[in-house]
Amino acid sequence: MPREIVTVQVGQCGNQLGLRWFDVMLQEHKAYPQYPEARDAVFLQDRQNKNALKARCVAVDMEEGVLQSMLRGPLKDIFDSNFFVSDVSGAGNNWAVGHMEYGDRYVDSIAESVRNQVEQCDCIQSFFVMHSLSGGTGSGLGTRVLGMLEDEFPHVFRICPVVWPSEVDDVVTAPYNSCFALKELVEHADCVLPIDNDALARMADRALGGRRGQGVIANGVPQPHAFSAAQPTTTRGLPFDSMNGLVAQLLSNLTCAMRFPGPLNMDMNEITTNLVPYPRLHLLTAAIAPLSVSSKHAAVGPRSVDAMITACLEPAHQFVDVRHGEGSAVTREAGMTLATALIARGPQTTIGDLTRGVVKLHEQMEMPYWNEDGFKTALCGVSPLGHKDSMLLLANNCAIRGKVESMLSKFERLYSVRSHVHHYDQYLSPATLRTRWRRCTRWWTTTRTWTRPRRRRMLRAP
């Protein structure tokens, strides 16, 4: 029985991420057609044409530009416009407009579209809710949709790959939008995968290595032999293709143990069960190796597996930059790690390789005394596109507090002089603004309590 994932992509950033995600999934289906369950996890066979595939997604944007470009692009045949929800004017980089005005107007139609997608699933595993934190539609309407999913489908896990703003962002009101959205993510998401724009840009440059991927499209489908993690296709006109390709590679490795067979399979619900010891501490730092893909396969063996695990501990391979590129976000120097997952992919990687990798990670990480063996492993026997093996590291590390602290400090600087507050007055009262600020600060204070290990209280013998 297939285990499906329904993607809900909101805003310009979320829809561009979703486009790259389905791009890579389509390439994997063309490369491995012998696994129909992997196909059915993210695609649905068209009722009128059994040879045609439709993406299991609901696309939402309050501007028509990105959605129309998806319907005109090389992957137009896999999207169904009946599951598109759009407006004309946009949210204007205002969280309150997206969350309250457009949320009240469109949340019912979005819920109906999601319900129709869920009814076509046999055993839905989770929702992927993709959006950004700095804009108005992604942060506002995206978090409103997240709350709706919790109310309508409480048994389905909600995993949110969200793009965090850069240190120097082009949206002036990004601190307000990010803090308001973060409060909603903490309360309504089951698992959040922060994607730092600054770290992602450096990873894309490293993956490109001074060259451009030469993607080839035949019959509207990108060919697997031309795949590049940094630039999956030759689609023009959409920005950040290389960065979105890396996020698609991350999500592909995240779901590989569920979609393909292997010695150690892992469902999506096992991620939250093993990596989230407390319900509000669910921001996971991700790292992946290798970043680039080559048509020539490198030598595979214990050393290559060890090298990939070592690379995941380097800041150049991590999707969150908490120390300005000067140190890792998951080692003991960064802070305490509450739990860790290691997801390997490749036919020649063994369980023994993972066991040896866990020992190595245990030496590099600082674990709490009550969860010293908090390591979850998964092994998929099918190679990723372009190379033989890959490694994905997920760590619930408290170093993410650095990004949250930077976000809150920017909020405080703006709010201390009431800058741009009048844009939110129509929807939020001053008391509501202060309440949301206090909730974000209270959550951040909770993460700080785990920066140092708690010593076990020893009981004296009578």
Image (spheres, rainbow, N blue to C red):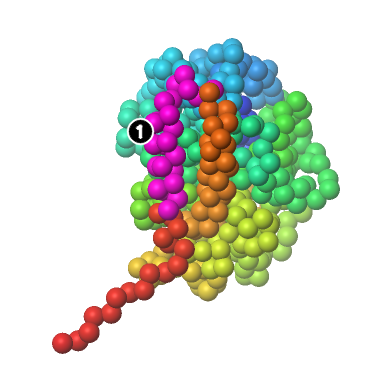
Region of the chain picked out in magenta, as a range: 423-445
Q: Is residue 380 magenta?
A: no
Q: Where residue 188 appears, x then y in whole percent?
A: 38, 38
Q: Residue at x 69, y 24 (%)?
A: 74
- Judging depth in this view, the residue of 181 and 379 nearest the camera is 181
* Quadrant the N terminus occupies: top left
Q: Could you say where residue 180 lies in the image, as x and y percent from the top left?
A: 47, 35
User: Residue drawn 40% across and 42% down?
Assistant: 439
Q: Residue at x 45, y 50 (%)?
A: 444
The quadrant holding residue 147 is top left
Is 360 or 367 nearer to us in this picture?
A: 367
Residue 430 visible in the picture:
yes
From the viewer's perspective, is 159 left or right of 229? left
Q: Identify the residue position indicated by label 1 in the image.
A: 150
| Position above or below: 348 against 412 | below
Say whether residue 329 is left or right of residue 459. right
- From the image, give the main secondary structure of the stretch colored magenta: helix
